Image (spheres, rainbow, N blue to C red):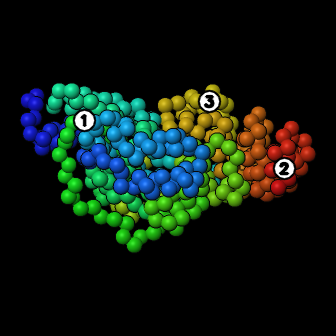
Amino acid sequence: MQVPSSPLDIASALRLKAQALGFDLCGFARALPPARGELFSDWLREGKAGTMTYLNRTEAKRRNPELVLPGVKTVISLGKSYFAGRLPEELRADPSRGVIASYAWQHDYHDALATKLQALGEFLEQFASGVTWKSFVDSGPVLERDFGETARLGFIGKNTLLIHPRMGSKFFLAEIFTTLDIPVENTKPMPSCGSCTRCLEVCPTHALPSAHVLDSTRCISYLTIEFRGVIERELREKIGNHVFGCDDCQECCPWVNKAANESHDKIHDAQIERSAPKLDTLAKLSESEFKTRFVGTPVMRARYEGFLRNVAIAIGNWRREEALVALEPLLKHESVLVRRHAAWALTRIPGETARRKRNEMSCHDASAEVRQEAAG
């Protein structure tokens, strides 16, 4: 191909290449300190990141792109939709099923997008000698939503997610930092949430105390994916049947619903067991079966023990006698963390059989923590 000579032609060529690689969105932003950098630091100081201490370690880099790539001039911001149809409400609300966040229904996006970013990075090298670049997919020291908003990939909603007026918020973000100076056109107007506060009202755990503020320590996605320990009793009931992540603050969003309604994609029967599998099936998984079932998907991030902890909580929120059969394998699990949450679940299941098992666990389990949970 003929190498574009003007900066505007370079920007156009990069957009076309990004589209050819499968990206749905592409924009450019100046590599300046993000406008919300100070708010991010305040958020960390307030402890709203929970146990995600890597955010503290990379705070300076997230606030200063020059520390990430010396001489950086432009951030290429990219979006890739992960919308794969809508889970029918009757399945989402079925207490015998565990709901998995929609971004995790398919294979892990990190590797797939990393390959595309590598190709785009190599493509931009031809536009000037000595050009350097670094790419990131949800794992680098980047305040990616800030750059996405500056590059006009969308606007940051009250639920803290980047929302595109046509695609909603169900898309992955990726970035390329480069020393290449690319023209930035930031005049395209963007809409906003307006007076809508549905996401703040819908969140089961009240993890959105105010607009544009997320308290990760109460967020179901954080609790079921990132957090490794014992989930507070007060939050367990509010987790409902979420076993990995949560889409509640997206599913209620008018922009997301508009994008979904305009799509012809419908969830296939084969996807149902990936999006809302039966809890009794999940509770029986051995560690090797867990790895086989979820290999190559984001669900692996929760790890086996954490995932079964989530399953135990979901079974506790089932609250019917038939839930006892599903809970049985977890009551005997070798992990104290799993048994502890299973014992709590047992206290929420009605019937004489469940009551008898509670008494047994409260007296005879090897762990004092489990005995305490069983005793209520």
Image position of 8 with respect to 161: above or below: above
Q: Is residue 101 left or right of residue 1?
A: right
Which element is circle 1 on? loop
Q: Residue at x 46, y 65 (%)?
A: 211
Looking at the picture, tell me which residue is in the foreground, 138 or 179.
179
Q: Please tell me whether mark 2 sits on a helix, a strand or a loop.
A: helix
Q: Which residue is mark 3?
A: 289
Label for residue 179? 1
* Relative horizontal placement of residue 319, taking residue 46 as reference (left or right): right
The residue furthest bottom is 195
In the rendering, at what x and y percent does residue 252 appear? 46, 62
Q: Nearer the viewer, residue 304 or 75?
A: 75
Measured Cα–Cα span from mark 3 to mark 1: 46 Å
Amino acid type at circle 2 is: Gln
Q: What's the residue at 20%, 58% (across, down)?
A: 187
Quarter of the picture holding the C terminus: bottom right
Mark 1: amino acid:
Thr
Q: What is the number of the mark on residue 372? A: 2
Q: Is residue 363 left or right of residue 141?
A: right
Tell me residue 335's x, y (percent). Answer: 74, 36
